[in-house]
Image (cartoon, helix red, strand yellow):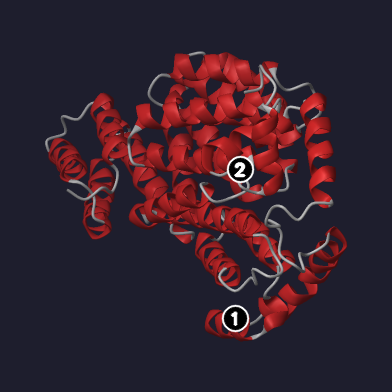
Amino acid sequence: MPTQHVPEDLLLLFAQGRLEGEARRGVVRHLLTVCDECRRTLKALEAQLDGSDSFEQPEPAHVASPGLLRTERSEAPQLWHELEALPSGHRLLLVRDDRRFHNRGFQEILVERARATASEDPIQAVELCQLALEIVHRLPFDHYRRSDVADLRTTALATLGNCKRLLGDLDGAAEAVDQALDSLDWGTGDPLEEINVLSIYGSLLTDLGRIEDAVEILAAAVRDAREIGDAQLEAKLLLQQSSTIGWYDPAAGLVLTRKALALLPGGENPHLDLVARYQLMILSCELGNVREARQQFEVWRFFFREQRNQGFWHTRSLQLEAALARREGRLEVCESFLRRLLDHYAKRELRHDMALTTLDLAEVLTASRKYDEALDLVQEILPVLRHWGASSDVLRACLMTQEAIERRSLEAAAFREASRVLRRSCFRRY
């Protein structure tokens, strides 16, 4: 729709609040591309409708004004301060019963805090998302537009799905993402909401081992970002695609990373720029360009340490240190970094990452001829995988790895294959 103007009859239905589903989303996307002519037409139609009673008003009688929303958002931190020190059960009861919490500003701050804490404390983040959903279900429709409430529900569900994904609860994550996708149909049609859900859906499909599906979903999100002219968002999604496919096809991942970098003017988004640099380093290392990757890492190491989200960057630094040391033949150094990485994931119950890192560490121990330690690791992870409901393919790959370690006949490629099976099958139940 961005290549041509929206027909006036569609703009009229949009102004009346009668346009739904994909048609509404298409109009919103077009308007976000800064089409001045369509915006002027829409404004004129709205002005005409203001003096007409020939249609049903789409807004509630006492819709929250922009000023009231600003007040809600300014008061939200103090409301959160009242809840922060309470046990989770008390928080839930208070949020359900106290109408002071039943407003958009407080719901938004819960989702923001859930996003901020997801990588460090996903269990806490899940609780915050559930509180946010409790509030969504209590927002009065005589005060908020239904489409706005739907958007709030979509964001909370998508964030909940991402937090459950990090915890390894992939069934719960899939359920939350499915509900978020359903909510999109009765929301405002904001493409940014759709892109956010597709991004999280892509991460979930990656963890489920459905790499091709994940790349396709993320490609749709990239197209949406390009359509609304958001170059930084497009770059972010390209980097996500690169991360998804990079472990499997590092050359393809490198191409996507370079495309993302081309969209990022220097200094405008330091976080995304650093993510791109990290992708260049890890993929170059994977492709065997170890010296180049090491030189780049020495240049950018300081910037990793200076970032605010240290949970995120701590794991990325450890992953890169381990990968470089492994390629350089410094097996003891690599082992040290992998053990630190495993401790980090274990403390936060990040199950998927724990399983993958365990196999990486077992590979290094085997290469160092520490067969008993490698065997202990694999034997420890097997019952955990069974408890999580790992697929038969994953369990079979780990059992074959265990048997090969016992025979002292395992090659590094076999560990890679076990990791590949784990990534592609993950914790799906058959």
Question: Disc 1 and disc 2: Cα gap in Å?
Answer: 32 Å
Residue plotted at (57% across, 71% down): 131
Residue 305, by quadrant, is top right
Residue plotted at (72% across, 73% down): 80
Q: Can residue 317 be seen in this view?
A: no
Q: Is residue 129 above or below residue 370?
A: below
Mark 1 vs mark 2: which is more N-terminal?
1
Circle 2: residue type: Gly
Residue situated in front as seen by the camera: 424 or 15 = 15
Toward the right, the furthest residue is 67
Circle 1: residue type: Arg
Classify 10 Å Cα crowding around label 2: few (below 14), some (14-19), many (20 and above): many
Residue plotted at (54% across, 33% down): 321
Q: Name the residue under label 2.
A: 189
Location of residue 318 in the rendering, given as x and y in whole percent from the top left corner: 54, 40
Residue situated in front as seen by the camera: 4 or 430 = 4
Q: Mark 1 points at which residue?
A: 91
Location of residue 275 in the rendering, given as x and y in whole percent from the top left corner: 63, 31
Residue plotted at (84% across, 58% down): 66
Left or right: where does residue 60 sit relative to residue 294? Answer: right
Residue 398, by quadrant, is top left
Say which element carries label 1: helix
Residue situated in front as seen by the camera: 367 or 66 = 66
Residue situated in front as seen by the camera: 214 or 2 = 2
Location of residue 63 in the rendering, given as x and y in whole percent from the top left corner: 76, 64
Say which element carries label 2: loop
Q: Can residue 138 be seen in this view?
A: yes
Q: In this view, does 154 lie above or below 206?
A: below
Left or right: where does residue 212 sit relative to residue 16? Answer: left
Q: Nearer the viewer, mark 1 or mark 2?
A: 2
